[in-house]
Amino acid sequence: MSDIKGVIFDLDGVIVSTDEYHFQAWNNLAEVEGVPFSRDDNERLRGVSRMESLEIILEKATREYTDEEKLAMATRKNDIYRESLKNLTPDDILPGVKDVLAGLRERGVKMAIGSSSKNAQPILAAIGLSDAFDAIVDGTHISNSKPDPEVFAKAGEQLGLAPKECLVVEDADAGVEAGVAAGMPVLAVGAASGHSAAVLHAADLTGISLNEMLMK
Ligand code: BG6
Ligand code: MG
């Protein structure tokens, strides 16, 4: 992995633990609408944009919704989610992340965020990592959500690196596929750690494991 000159991190589920907030907000919406929604259903929303997530949830709905209604629902979900983000602090940074970022910085490896979320900037501000990355590409900068490679391709470009020089770190199947489609090696962590398309697998993201991989 010695030709890796940059690491592009997904945000939700890799850098910070926002999973429960997303679940609670969607669950609230689903209950109001009387649409069945489980934690298994929620797993399918990992890495997927807000509107596409809503479409997945509405697969179990008993009626059709107009585009206007869908937009209103997505806005409602986001309002609930944004309210819970007020609880976010640097303590919500996932274990090992700060060590990894410090280790990479020390070694001169460039770092970026490649996230589907339109809330990436306020989340990074809440956890105190707004200035920790050389580039931030998020849901407000892209037209096609993961598994489309757009977010990672843009992040790689902003780092000034070729795809094969960038390592993607992802917890979502859609994100692993996006990284592979961008022509980048992918380290799959957390929920995606067993993904067959990933070039690298890790049960957890620790300073040692990622830094050691980059040294190889
Ligand atoms: C991804 C999350 O990072 O962002 C998804 O894994 C979420 O669950 C997506 O739907 C979009 O997030 P937001 O904050 O724009 O609603
Ligand atoms: Mg994620």
Image: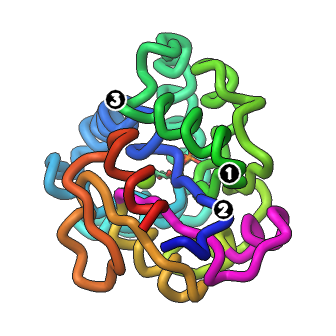
Name the foreground residue: 30 vs 83. Answer: 83
Return the residue at label 2. Answer: 6
Q: Amino acid at mark 3?
A: Pro
Q: Amino acid at mark 1?
A: Met
* Residue 42 in view (yes/no): no
Q: Is residue 45 above or below residue 151?
A: above
**Disc 3 within 8 angstroms of ligand 2 (CB):** no
Return the residue at label 3. Answer: 95
> Please, what secondary structure does the residue beneath circle 2 have?
strand
Closer to the chain start, of discs 3 and 2, is: 2
Tell which tag, 3 or 2, sits nearer the viewer: 2
> Please, what secondary structure does the residue beneath circle 3 have?
loop
Closer to the chain start, of discs 1 and 3, is: 3
Q: Is residue 27 above or below residue 182?
A: above
Query: What crowding class fits label 1: few (fewer than 14 Cα within 10 Å), some (14-19), or many (20 or more)?
Result: many
Query: What crowding class fits label 3: few (fewer than 14 Cα within 10 Å), some (14-19), or many (20 or more)?
Result: some
